[in-house]
Image (tube, rainbow, N blue to C red):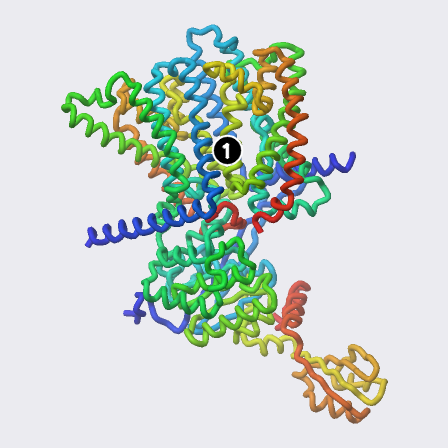
Amino acid sequence: MPLVFRQYWKTMIMEAAAAVGESRLFLVGCLMRFVRVVALLSIWRTVMVGKSQVSGMTLHALLTYTLLSEICADLLLCRTGLEAAWFSGSITTRFLRPVSLFNQFSAEMLGRAMLSVSLFALPLALASPLLGISLRPASLFGGALFFLSLAAAIGVGLALEYIFVGIGVNAGIHPYAINGMRSAVSVVLSGALIPLKLLPWGIGLWLSWLPFASQASAPLTIFTGTEPVIKPFLLQLVWLIILWPCARWLWRANREKMVSYGG
Amino acid sequence: MAKQDPKGTALSDIAVELSAVSKTFHQRQRNEQLSGILRNLLRPEFKSIPALSGLSLAINRGEILAYAGANGAGKSTTVKLCCGMLAPDSGEVRVLGMNPLSDRLKCVSRIGVVFGQRTELWFDHPVSASFEWKRVVWDIPDDSYRVALKRMKDLLGLDEFFNTQARELSLGQRMRADLGLALVHDPEMLFLDEPTLGLDVLARRSILGFLKELNRTRGVTIIVTSHQTADLEELAGRIVLIHKGKLAFDGSFDALRKTCGDTRRLILEADAVTAPDMSAMGARLVSTEGRHHEYLFDASRNTIAEILSEAARQCAILDVETHRTDIDDVVADIYETWQRGQHPTGE
Amino acid sequence: MAVKAGYGLLRRIARLLALYARMDLLLLTRDPLMTAGWAITDLVINLASVSGLLLLAQRFAGIGTWSRPSFVFMLGYASLVEGLVATLFGYNVSHISRRIGRGQLDHSLLQPQPLWIVLLTEGFSPAFGAPALLPGTLLLIWGWRMLPQAPWAAFRSMGHGCGALAWSGLFVLDMASSVVVVMAFQYGWGSLAFWSPRASEELNTSTHDLLSTLKSFPLNAMSPILRFGLLSIIPAGFVGWAPVAGLLQIGHIWFLITPAAALISAAAAAIVFKAGLKHYGKTGSQRYSAFGHRS
């Protein structure tokens, strides 16, 4: 196995094991997520009473969209430990490892996601019939493209992570402020919580052009077939091409500041 | 009715008393394999680690006690027990006549604690803000605070960084600020857990000097843990060594040296290149360089006069140097002996 | 004697609150750029947290049986509760699992005052918390203005002035109770970090986010099992739905249900926290990180 894969795998295992290393109490977090998604599903059932569809979305599509969003939550709005490492100053020691920083942080993120997928997302997907939801894609093509779109969503998410932290370092904004702002903005603008199509005054149409939509709305609409599948996927590719060079440039420009923060 | 001090606790010459104190921690065990994650979820494994096993110890008021032991010996656990952060599994802990757990509030208002690896300073505030915080939270009367603060500033040189943010201090400055903060409420006793960790020689000297002065002038009882045994020797008259949670040695530094046989180093400059043979006197030749010959001998078995007269019998002696064994070496030897499963005092 | 002691205690708490307010202001104002950054960030975070449901209410002209004005009023109420929690219990006091999980409780235990006083005062952050109060206040006023009649209409039998006064008193009581419910929820679940500091360090992030998402969901639209769950082990219903339904007399909600829930949840949280603290006394903290505390 190539070295980079072995490094990735080992880091992922370490990160996954750290979370479950001491107790089964981490399952409480899964319970919280389950309650959240069930409550959201019930809201959709309430607002859609007496309506066959709203903005081209049927109740069935809406429920599938919401459930899939929760199942893929760790990957759609992906978060690495970058700003925490920057804040605590531990990022300095990261430079001493023979692995690129990008690989270190993304491997850790995938490790956490791996655990979350196996202990929460998969059981939730299997239990979907019990919640009265079918997790079948709207079309075979959409189903296949969903996985590519999901990979692109992770790519866009990681690029945004580096850009936000880079801007924060450059402007001297506190890492927690950066973290909070990005989380809040992403949840609303990405369509992870509420499908963009359901927003009033046509806001959703405008938001769908932003990079945040490529993080969640794109793969979810592709899967549920609530939009022509090609446009969101192409937009994701465009954002990948734009965002990554920006992220790399910001990262290089601020590297010294980043390492010296936190002592 | 027991005699009481003005603060309402029993007055005694004993500042800290530990009676048959035991404390065991349970550590979760897991291998590094993926399968270990799943096994750990279903059937977690634990290992018991005795931190203290029936430890009994008394420390007098006004004393400076060096508290040493290898990593994991139970030093920090003892300090945490004395500060009311941990409860013993069995046995009793008394600090200034109080149970630090049930009388936590009274107790912590009369002691000062410094953990070398953590700071009590507020990171994103200037040092002055942490002192002001301490004044309010500890409810220190204004007059006493002003006097104590001035004393701390003078003795520890806090003025040069008093308005600097804590996170921008050097390690030495941070430790001085932490010490000042721990003492500004005028505590009767001070617990120091690794106070010289990572400090350069000048910063160490300044802190050790300050602590000695504090003990001499204000009679503050000090319990200090450190891996720098030489620092401990400079500071304290009495050393307690613990090993696997048990008291392994309690006495003076001289007595500690003697447990290893009071080994000394002798360097002779003779007129001959051949080193005198003094094996009959128990002196072992360690090295020879030109006319300089180095020996190790046990001063408790043969006096230096006897050894020198034997040397003088064999050759003409031009110069003599003797050294006591470095205390760090003594302690290292003791730890090594413990690792081999023996006890230097034969227990 | 007891009155004097009570007065002394209140004075001490007031003195500590003043101290922490000053420190909070000092921290915020040490750098103008950072001050502006924080203010904007907090505003964005708080606006974002309500905008989703607000837009949804606009799109569907309310949610279920809740009209748009009453829903906006509820959103404002719930946001104000969240803002109050952020203002009164900042610096990870409301995210107690972080302090426990990172071994930072030792800093509190070294202070010569009861732990409850430390936790009641140390998180007071009027400067950092102010932006969090703004969206809730604005939404509340907006919702109020849109309501077809005064919110104390149901209390008119007491006379107009008395009715308004009684309603205002109930509003303040409910608001305080909702804050207590949120804190009890955070402490009840966050105390699990005493037993599993690593795995549960960020548990209060999950619980906080959960309440934040569910705080203004109208529970009458949900199944009885889910509604029971959201009024017991995850009491999101008491952050917005139940108190506002009581205040606006929507449905048949007992108007003192939120204060009663606050009492019960506070007692439950205190039991769990005390048990956790006892466990902490046995095990101590095996980890320590200065991260996020006092900074």
Which residue is painted at 56% across and 49% down in the image? A262
**For mark 1, what is the residue?**
A181
* Few, some or many residues within 10 Å of mark 1 (<14, 14–19, 20+): many
Q: In which quarter of the image is residue A163?
A: top right
Which residue is painted at 43% across and 71% down in the image? B220
Q: Which of C265 and C9 is in front in this view?
A: C9
Q: Nearer the viewer, residue C190 or A236?
A: A236
As drawn, B154 above or below A205: below
Is residue B137 something that shows in the picture?
A: yes
As drawn, B155 above or below C45: below
Q: In which quarter of the image is residue C238?
A: top left
Q: Quadrant of residue C263?
A: top left
Q: Which of A41 and C196 is in front in this view?
A: A41
- Name the secondary structure under disc 1: helix
User: How many numbered circles are shown?
Assistant: 1
Q: Which of A111 and A106 is in front in this view?
A: A106
Which residue is painted at 46% across and 52% down in the image? B125
